[in-house]
Amino acid sequence: MLKFLKSLFGAPDSVQSPTIGTAAVESPRNRVPGLEVETASSCSQEGSAAALEASATRAGTSDLAPVVPQPALKSQAQLDEELIASQAWIDAVTAGEQAWIDKMDALLAAVRSAQEEGRAVPLMMLSQYFWLKTPVPELGTSKLLDELRERIEKDFSVKSYRTYIENKTKTRWNSYPHSVDWYMGEYLQVRPSYLDGLRDLFEKIPERIGIVEDHYDTLKAGEKEFRPAAGGDNLLRFKGFLTKYAQEHLPGVTPLDFFPGNSPRYIRDYFGSDIKISGYLLLWGMMSVVQVSRSSGAQSSTSQIGIEFEKKLIAEISEKFPAARIEPTPVTGDQGADVILILDGVKIVIQAKKYTGVVGNAAVQEVFAAMQFYDADYAMVVTNSRYTAAAQTLATKIGVELATASDYLRRIQQLIV
């Protein structure tokens, strides 16, 4: 039986020790048919899997886009450095520096013109605004101009602002992420807008005094309540009251008036406190002007200055309208008229007001009464100053013409046509 089985499976007649190494694998005599098939099948499967994997890898690789290397992101400092070095930035900064010079010259020219014309009140208010304390006799001299320039240059010093920005970029770098040079360049571009606001404020001081005239009773009540010298109990509260009132009711004194909405907020905030203090000082000074005008009658046109103004108007009317008959009224008892003009059958009563402040309701009422008294066709007030809002409203209601020294001749021409 054993022999039969051996012959059936092809086994050798005697058992031999298996060879070790390569011969054990490659020798046909050592191969077991079932094991050989299984091994071959396994190798075949592994080979197929490897082939599929390689094919899949090749297929996947062909579908991917080529990898493009990305440039490194630039830091804020690098971006700032590139911008500052650009010609556009350099030109903008240079233009800002030149604009500062030009606008300063324009402001001082406007102040010099006021000096030549003897407009003391705007000059006093400008000195008050900067707390220069210029003596009245020196308001018309070069001293005011020199002090004004020096004060503005000091307040808006490039060196001082740079020190401030250097500190902010170190201590508040999250709020000030740019370089110091970047902030300085922007400052030099924006700085001239302050001079625009200041010049506009100076040229409109008479109008601002008119606003103070309209609010005077409220302001005096606040002064009486808070200012110790007037019977109040707290000077700081009085300053706070005036500061708030100026910001809410007096045009031209807010930070936005000097640095409009397109200006960087951090620049507006930096100068905001000083601008508000100056607004409070200006309002306080204007209250004094109104108080003096009310208490002393400093606006009266019966003064020598007023008489000279009347003579000037008469001379100009005579030159413009040679055929007109002009009758000056008595200095006293004029019933509210300084000049009576008759031209082409039209009678016009004129009241001349050479004012240091603004013209209020009283002048409108007086000339209206004069129109009734002299049986005139028209009534007109002529001033070198401005009119309060209340005076303009009343004049419109009762038909009184409000003119200035620069346009009254044209207004007369319109009345006689």
Image (cartoon, rainbow, N blue to C red):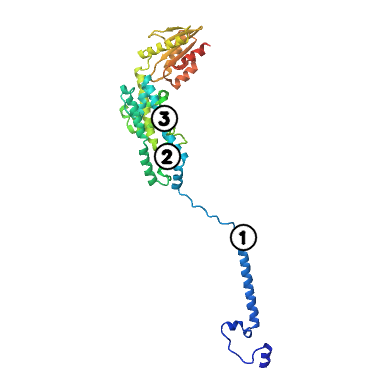
Name the residue: 64% across, 77% down.
40
Q: Hey, what amino acid is under mark 1?
A: Ser
Q: Indicate the quadrant where residue 185 lies.
A: top left
Name the N-terminal-most of marks 3 and 2: 3
Horizontal and vertical percent position of residue 89: 46, 39
Q: Distance from label 3 to label 1 (Cα)?
A: 68 Å
Identify whether 73 is placed above or below 279. Answer: below
Q: Hey, what amino acid is under mark 3?
A: Asp
Q: Assess whether mark 2 and mark 3 are in contact (beta carbons under 8 angstroms).
A: no
Q: Is residue 37 left or right of residue 311?
A: right
Horizontal and vertical percent position of residue 216: 39, 24
Identify whether 49 is placed above or below 406. Answer: below
The disc placed on residue 185 is 2
Q: Distance from label 3 to label 2 (Cα)?
A: 18 Å
Q: Hey, what amino acid is under mark 2?
A: Gly
Q: Label 3, secondary structure: give it.
A: helix
The disc placed on residue 102 is 3
Q: Is residue 9 left or right of residue 288?
A: right
Q: Label 1, secondary structure: give it.
A: helix
Q: Label 2, secondary structure: give it.
A: helix
Identify whether 55 is placed above or below 35. Answer: above
Q: Which residue is mark 1?
A: 62
